[in-house]
Amino acid sequence: GESVGLHLPTLSVQEGDNSIINCAYSNSASDYFIWYKQESGKGPQFIIDIRSNMDKRQGQRVTVLLNKTVKHLSLQIAATQPGDSAVYFCAERREAAGNKLTFGGGTRVLVKP
Amino acid sequence: DTGVSQDPRHKITKRGQNVTFRCDPISEHNRLYWYRQTLGQGPEFLTYFQNEAQLEKSRLLSDRFSAERPKGSFSTLEIQRTEQGDSAMYLCASSLNEGGYEKLFFGSGTQLSVL
């Protein structure tokens, strides 16, 4: 079936190091992707988005890379901080299927001091 | 606070009871979404509105579930005859359309526990 998934369920990273979270998607018609951060007891928080006509987009301390050839998306967090500890979700949208986002299963990032 | 607001934050109910949740979206957003999330999983789409019109419903949304957005502003999600399997976090999101691409902004959710 069509799905958005993540390679690693848990990622432990030392404070100050860079983090890379990966996401695979299966539908080549997906045209828009968003990364969300979710802290315990809170709703998902928008981090960064990327359209399918782009390969890379940068925000504050975050970079999203999109490889459409292998249907792979990654989120890079520079100089990871304790406040980055959370579950990260990638979500995809296919315009032909309406505007709803389909979410993957999430990766938990644990930042060690 | 100008974010998406949901009420209540937590709801505990007995099986068979009806519950209603409310969502107040960001004021300038015309689309409103409901998602459901269980522990360790990503949010699953339930339904969405554009203004007051309900445009799509997921197959997850059984006939016990009903959502309304009567004036195109706040929305309610009602679950009738709750079952233990309804226990989940119910998330509301509203969206800002930028050049045909929508960024969804989520509220903090309503955590439902059905005993």
Image (tube, rainbow, N blue to C red):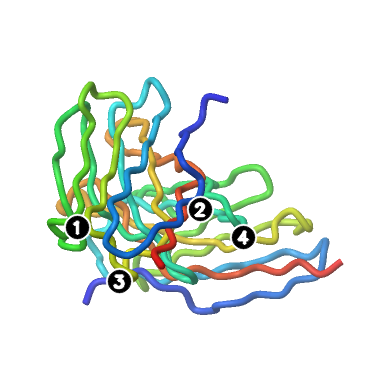
Label 3 chain ID: A
Residues at marks 2 and 4, CA–CA distance in whole angstroms: 13 Å
Discs 3/1, front: 1
Q: Amino acid at mark 4?
A: Gln
Q: According to the image, label 2 marks what residue?
A: A36
Q: According to the image, label 3 marks what residue?
A: A3
Residues at marks 1 and 2, CA–CA distance in whole angstroms: 24 Å
Q: Amino acid at mark 2?
A: Tyr
- SS category of the residue bearing label 1: loop
Q: According to the image, label 1 marks what residue?
A: B61
Circle nearer the N terminus (3, 4): 3
Which residue is painted at 39% across and 64% down in the image?
A: B114
Q: Are marks 2 and 4 on the same chain?
A: yes
x then y, percent, for residue A26? 29, 72
Q: Nearer the viewer, residue A77 or B31?
A: B31
Q: According to the image, label 4 marks what residue?
A: A76
Q: Are marks 3 and 4 in contact (CB under 8 Å)?
A: no
Q: Are marks 2 and 4 in contact (CB under 8 Å)?
A: no
Above or below B15: residue A57: above
Which residue is painted at 19% across and 46% down in the image?
A: B66
Asked if residue A41 lies left or right of residue B30, the reply is right
- Label 4 crowd bin: few (<14), some (14–19), many (20+), radius 10 Å: some
Residues at marks 3 and 1, CA–CA distance in whole angstroms: 19 Å
Q: Are marks 3 and 2 on the same chain?
A: yes
